[in-house]
Amino acid sequence: MKKMTVVLCCSLLTLGFSLSAVAASGPETLNLKDVFGVEGKKQAVIFPHHRHQAKVACASCHLNPRGGGPVKFDLADRSGVGNDFHRKWCWPCHVEMEVPKGKSCTTCHSGPV
Ligand code: HEC
Ligand code: HEC
Ligand code: HEC
């Protein structure tokens, strides 16, 4: 009987940990037009969040070094090709890390208009 209780407790603990691990890493992909309320005619950016998590630190984007919550960039200018998403956030790192086609429009703008 005692053994059963221990086993049950352990499985509940494991379940709890794996659930919180999933929640803490956030969504796999994000539609950035929706997330940031961006208007315009360009196709929406479907951002591969999990692929970035595998290659760069959470603190590259999030204010909180452990990830989640707001991003650390001032994104006041949201229109045209000279917008802050390009200039301050996505493009500089893609250039620095030599992401293939990292500045090609279709690499990022692949979602619905
Ligand atoms: C590394 C990713 C990335 C690349 C490459 C990229 N963009 Fe963007 N762009 C964004 C993000 C993020 C936004 C803001 C969110 C959104 O519009 O979905 C944005 C927004 C825009 C906007 C303002 C919103 C709108 O619909 O008018 C324009 C215009 C734009 N991009 C044009 C371009 C053009 C032209 C290229 C190719 C020269 C390009 N982008 C390449 C990430 C990228
Ligand atoms: C290349 C940029 C980037 C990296 C790196 C990144 N994230 Fe995110 N993350 C985002 C964006 C963009 C959002 C959506 C932000 C919003 O909703 O305002 C987001 C949202 C989240 C969310 C869900 C929403 C929230 O507000 O809490 C979690 C959880 C999260 N990220 C965790 C992480 C963790 C953990 C890491 C590191 C292992 C990480 N992220 C790395 C860009 C990134
Ligand atoms: C701190 C560095 C960094 C930042 C900031 C960053 N990226 Fe990336 N991005 C990468 C790396 C590294 C890869 C290559 C990932 C891989 O090989 O799986 C990548 C890959 C991508 C890809 C996939 C390209 C492909 O070949 O399919 C997309 C789409 C993308 N990023 C969009 C964005 C957008 C949109 C932003 C800004 C909101 C952004 N990234 C910001 C480092 C970054």
Image (cartoon, rainbow, N blue to C red):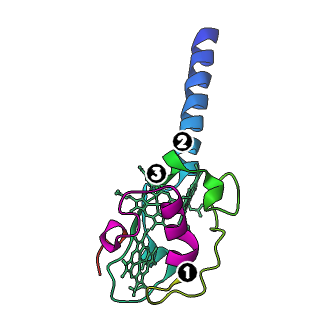
Depth check, mark 2 against mark 3: the one in front is 3
- Disc 3 target residue: 50
For the residues labelled 2 and 1, the Cα–Cα distance comes to 35 Å
Q: Earlier in the sequence, mark 3 or mark 1?
A: 3
Does 18 appear above or below 105?
A: above
Give the camera-side residue of 80 and 68: 80
Say which of 112 and 89 sits in front: 89
Which quadrant of the rendered structure holds the N terminus? top right
Between label 3 and label 1, give the one nearer the viewer: 1
Residue 84 badge: 1
Labelled pair 3, 1 in contact (Cβ < 8 Å) = no
Q: Which residues are magenta?
A: 84-107
Q: For the residue labelled by badge 1, is the local secondary structure a helix, a strand or a loop?
A: helix
Amino acid tagged 3: His
Tell me, yes or no, if residue 67 can be seen here: no
Q: Which mark is residue 19?
A: 2
Q: Residue at x 57, y 17 (%)?
A: 7
Quadrant where the C terminus is found in the figure? bottom left
User: Is ligand 1 within 8 Å of the beta carbon of the residue shown at mark 1?
Assistant: no
Tell me the kind of residue under disc 2: Leu
Locate residue 32, reporting x and y percent: 45, 73
**Whole-percent x, y for residue 55 in the image:** 51, 47
Q: Which mark is residue 52?
A: none
x, y percent for residue 51: 44, 51
User: Mark 3 falls on what kind of element?
Assistant: helix
Residue visible at 42% across and 88% down in the picture: 39
Find residue 103 and report its horizontal and vertical position in percent: 40, 69
Mark 1 is on which residue type? Asp
* Residue 109 on the magenta span: no
- Give the Cα distance between marks 2 and 3: 16 Å
User: Is the magenta region chiefly helix, strand or loop?
Assistant: helix
